[in-house]
Image (cartoon, rainbow, N blue to C red):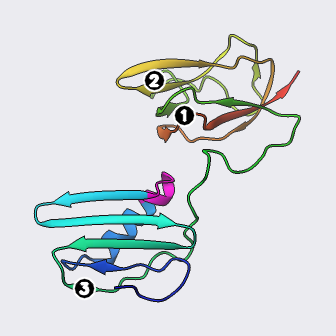
Amino acid sequence: MNSGGGAGSAILEGKRMEIDQIRKLIELMVANDLSELDISDGETKVKLKRGPGELHVVSSPVASVAAPAPEAVAPPAAEPEEVSPPEELVEIRSPMVGTFYTAPSPDSEDFVSVGSPVAEDTVVSIVEAMKVMNEIKAECTGTVAEVCVANAQPVEFGQVLFRVRPA
């Protein structure tokens, strides 16, 4: 069952879920750039799929209700980074999937911030993968122009973490 509405339309089939629950799931998908999400809770199963211009929510057992989606749902990115940076900036990308950290511990200062000078061996962040803390080095010389990921956010392989203006 599809509720019309073009971009951002949503469908819900099955056990009635609260609109707020659906919105939270959609926000989670958008924030983490997910194109599909499957959740099972007892007899209730929810499957969310996001494609160009629409979002589908399917839940079972079968009984249906239409639910609105958030106003702006972006299509999934073909690659981790959609926007091309200005050519003069060098990108520092994540070498793995994991959780991005800007500091060695929650009470420590960030490794770098916008305006910080970096050299090839400067540690700029940590990406935690499978409980292993992996130091990410700049591998270039220059000044940090942009921090592209917030602390403690999940990152994908190849996702841009920083942009550096070369020296």
Residue neighbourhood size for the residue with mark 3, other residues' Cα within 10 Å, grouped as few (<14), some (14–19), many (≥20): some
Q: Which residue is mark 3?
A: 64
Residue neighbourhood size for the residue with mark 2, other residues' Cα within 10 Å, grouped as few (<14), some (14–19), many (≥20): few
Amino acid found under the numbered disc labelled 3: Ser
Residue 112 position, x and y percent, is 66, 25
Amino acid found under the numbered disc labelled 2: Ser
Please tell me whether mark 3 sits on a helix, a strand or a loop: strand
Please tell me whether mark 2 sits on a helix, a strand or a loop: loop
Q: Residue at 41% x, 65% y: name it.
A: 49
| Disc ID at residue 39 | none
Q: Residue furthest bottom?
A: 4
Q: Residue at 33% x, 78% y: name it.
A: 19
Cα separation, mark 3 vs mark 1, equals: 38 Å
Instruction: Give the magenta-colored segment's residue range.
Output: 28-35
Cα separation, mark 1 vs mark 2, equals: 23 Å
Relative to residue 160, is residue 18 depicted above or below? below
Amino acid found under the numbered disc labelled 1: Phe
| Disc ID at residue 157 | 1
Residue 76 position, x and y percent, is 56, 58
